[in-house]
Image (tube, coloured by chain):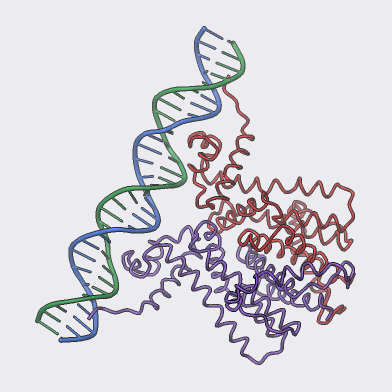
Chain colours: A purple, B red, C green, D blue
Amino acid sequence: MPKIVDHDARRAELAAALWRVVGRAGVAGATVRAVADEAGWSMGALRHYFASQGELLRFAMDTLLQDVPPRLAAHLAADLEPRERARRLLLELVPVDEERRIEAIVWLALLERSRTDPSLAEPREIAWLGERHICRLVVAELLDLPAPASPQDRFEDESSGERGAQAAGSSTERGARATGPAGIAPSPEEEAEALHTFVDGITLQATTWPGEWTPAAMRASAERQLDSVLQRAGR
Amino acid sequence: MPKIVDHDARRAELAAALWRVVGRAGVAGATVRAVADEAGWSMGALRHYFASQGELLRFAMDTLLQDVPPRLAAHLAADLEPRERARRLLLELVPVDEERRIEAIVWLALLERSRTDPSLAEPREIAWLGERHICRLVVAELLDLPAPASPQDRFEDESSGERGAQAAGSSTERGARATGPAGIAPSPEEEAEALHTFVDGITLQATTWPGEWTPAAMRASAERQLDSVLQRAGR
DNA sequence: ATCTTTCTAGCACGACCGTGCGATATCGGG
DNA sequence: CCCGATATCGCACGGTCGTGCTAGAAAGAT
């Protein structure tokens, strides 16, 4: 009986408009009116899909999150050498092209907003686990270690052990053996932590000072990170 | 004749209030009224020191910038072993205590705003040069290289050479000596770049997911970065 | 063709923003 | 003591925001 539209398609369209606006004017400029105009709709139409601005931002953040796993799956399914797989996984987290750069800008802006908007806290935490998980995958791939448990599994296993066990344990067990000058081979979790820091750092750098970072420079920098993981492991 | 107050002291007081507000409510919450209330003043009084909100934010950013050099100077003047000096310099850029964490939050928020507010572009660029310079100092200290030219000198020498000369030159001269598996010792500028990325990454991490980063974890992570620089140089 | 449900449009309201401005208070030199 | 420059106050204006709401358009089932 009624007029029927594809809500999901509309929401995706809205998200695209939102990103264009955020990329142009920042999150502060992402008002309901501006997004509606950008999409070519009225405010009333937009409110049929998002009852409030909070829902819109939450949706944008969830969408950014959901776009990552499929891209990863492609690299995990492909038949690749370890180094190449590690490279591709890591580069998924680096804003190497214009599309990803815009996404990264939006992402950073949403992270900033999540500091004061509790409704964005959940995707922020999920993102942290997801990013860290990918970094663990990269390390495991490079060092030929067993694949780490996925974030979902960890969450389900929450009752049987705390999340930081792996990191905490290894930071105490190191301290004696010196492999290099002052060098001690870091644990896999410490390597994942370092990659995680690298990824966030290059994201901030490339979005804030794009003139200093060409895609080629980012790739080269990532490559050196992979080299370092191998070198620190003594390989 | 007139009533006289110390403008600089007032401005500093204002900046402190601004940081408290930003730390609590984000930059979006840093309205003229909120800052005035936080400082215990009226809106009109505030406008005697900052004619507009833009001036207030610009001042806040400049203040954050100006606070860094004195702290650095102390470490540069002190009689320290290279490793210790490098450590202290690097840790100046890491939010290891609560005060620095708040400053980092404010800083990130201002960076975000600088994306759409041209008046904040200049301090942003100065900050990049300054951070990079400190990273170069750390590398030079660690690897016993001559101290790099300061950002100001570089700026003054602009006519006689481009800024990226050191990076471009050394990235071409590398390529032969392999120290590790796929390892090629990165150039000093590449090491500085890596440290720079690390610093920004840990800043973003520690401010966005403070639960995951204790000060001790940050120090340990920084230590491993220093180890890596030495190890990559083959020492 | 008509009815029912969904969708769209845009006005209206209250809240809050930055800022201009005039009244008032405060101090220091004459 | 008192004048005048400076500092402080807070109201008021115009603008923009998010959101509630109602009138009307659109479209499939009957």
Give the residue furthest to the bottom.
Answer: A79
A31 horizontally vs A78: left or right: left
As drawn, A71 above or below B123 = below
As drawn, A57 above or below D27 = above
Quadrant of the rendered image containing residue A96:
bottom right
**Residue B155 on image: x %, y %:** 73, 54
Quadrant of the rendered image containing residue A133:
bottom right
**Residue B1 on image: x %, y %:** 58, 19
B76 horizontally vs A210: left or right: right
B55 horizontally vs B169: left or right: left
Count of numbered tags: 0
Q: Nearer the viewer, residue A199 or A136?
A: A136
Residue at the spot 57% in from the left edge and 64% down from the top edge: A108
Q: Quadrant of the C terminus of chain B?
A: bottom right
Residue at the spot 55% in from the left edge and 55% down from the top edge: B113
Residue at the spot 39% in from the left edge and 70% down from the top edge: A39
**Residue B18 on image: x %, y %:** 57, 44
B168 horizontally vs A44: left or right: right
As drawn, A177 above or below B222 = below
Residue at the spot 67% in from the left edge and 75% down from the top edge: A135
**Residue A50 on image: x %, y %:** 38, 67
